[in-house]
Image (tube, rainbow, N blue to C red):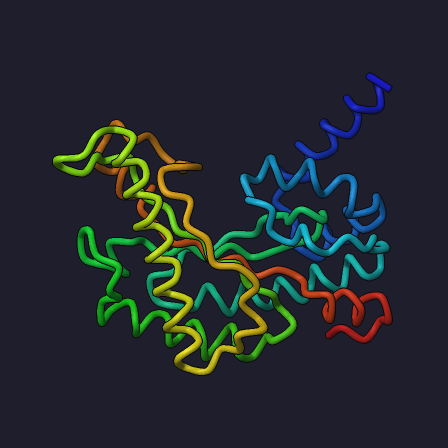
Amino acid sequence: MKKMKTIILALCAGLMLQSCSNALKGAGLGALGGGVLGGVVGRIAGNTGVGAAIGAAVGATAGTLIGRHMDKVKAQAQAVQNAQVQSVTDANGLQAVKVTFDSGILFTSGSSTLSSTARTSLSQFANEVLIPNPDCDVAIQGYTDNTPFRGYSAAQSVQKNLELSQQRAQAVTNYLLSIGVSAAQIRSTMGFGEENPVASNSTADGKAQNRRVEVYLYASQTMIDAANAGTLQ
C-alpha cells in the first residue's frame, strides 16, 4: 500500500510539472480514472473543489477529447484583456482553465463596484469564452490579502475580508449574468477572504497578487457525456 501511494504521488507530481498540452494530460488522467487520482491532483493544484460534483470516471479517449476541448477554451481566454490564464486539474482529474483577474483592475480599493476597465474585460470574457462554450461549467472565487480594517479587531478584519471577497465574486457573477451568460452555467460563487494566498502578504506586490477574483472553467456533465460518446469537438 505504501509503495502504491508513493507511485501515485510521484505520478501526480510528474503530471503537474510536465509542459505537455491539455490533450495529452487528459489522456493520461483518463486512463488512470479521474475520480481517485483527480482528488490528489486537485489539492496539489490549489483548486478549491472545482468539479467535485461530477463523480463519473472518464476513460482515456474521453479524457483526450476533453483535454483538446479545454486547450481551445484556454486559447480563447488568453486573448481576453487583463486576464491571466493557466491550465489546472479539477477534483475529478480532468483539465480545467483558471482565469485570474487582478482586483486592482476589477475594483477600487475597499469596493465591490466593478470599474469600467473590469466591465470591458468581463464583456470580452463573456462574449468570446463563456457564451461560446456553454458546455463549460464555471466557478467564481474571490480572495483578499490580509490587510486589517481600521478600527476592527484581527478576528473582525478576517470576517470583513471574507465578506468583501464574497461581494466581489458576486459582483463579477452578477455582471456576467447581466450581459447574457446563462445562470445555469455559473455553478458556484464564493468568497474565501484571506485564504489560499498565492504570494506572501509581507510585501505590497504579494498583497496585490492575493487580491484577486479567479474564474474556473471545467467540464460539465454535458461535456463529459459528449466525450464518452466520442462526439465532443
Find residue 25 and report its horizontal and vertical position in percent. Answer: 71, 49
Residue 64 visible to an observer of this rendering: yes
Q: Residue at x 77, y 21 (%)?
A: 6
Q: Is residue 73 above or below residue 166?
A: below
Q: Is residue 133 above or below residue 4?
A: below
Spot the residue most to the left: 151
Find residue 173 and report its horizontal and vertical position in percent. Answer: 42, 67
Residue closer to the observer: 64 or 183: 183
Name which quarter of the figure residue 11 lies in.
top right
Find residue 52 and report its horizontal and vertical position in percent. Answer: 67, 50
Locate the N terminus by quadrant. top right
86 relative position to 29: left or right = left
User: So how many labels did they put on this image?
Assistant: 0
Q: Residue at x 81, y 55 (%)?
A: 56
Locate the C terminus by quadrant. bottom right
Name which quarter of the figure residue 225 lies in.
bottom right
Q: Is residue 147 above or below residue 48?
A: above
Find residue 119 and report its horizontal and vertical position in percent. Answer: 30, 72
209 relative position to 59: left or right = left
190 relative position to 12: left or right = left
Spot the residue most to the bottom: 180
Q: Residue at x 41, y 50 (%)?
A: 191
Name which quarter of the figure residue 153 lies in.
top left
Q: Residue at x 76, y 73 (%)?
A: 232
Residue closer to the observer: 232 or 177: 177
Residue 206 visible to an observer of this rendering: no
189 relative position to 167: left or right = right
Q: Is residue 156 above or below residue 130?
A: above
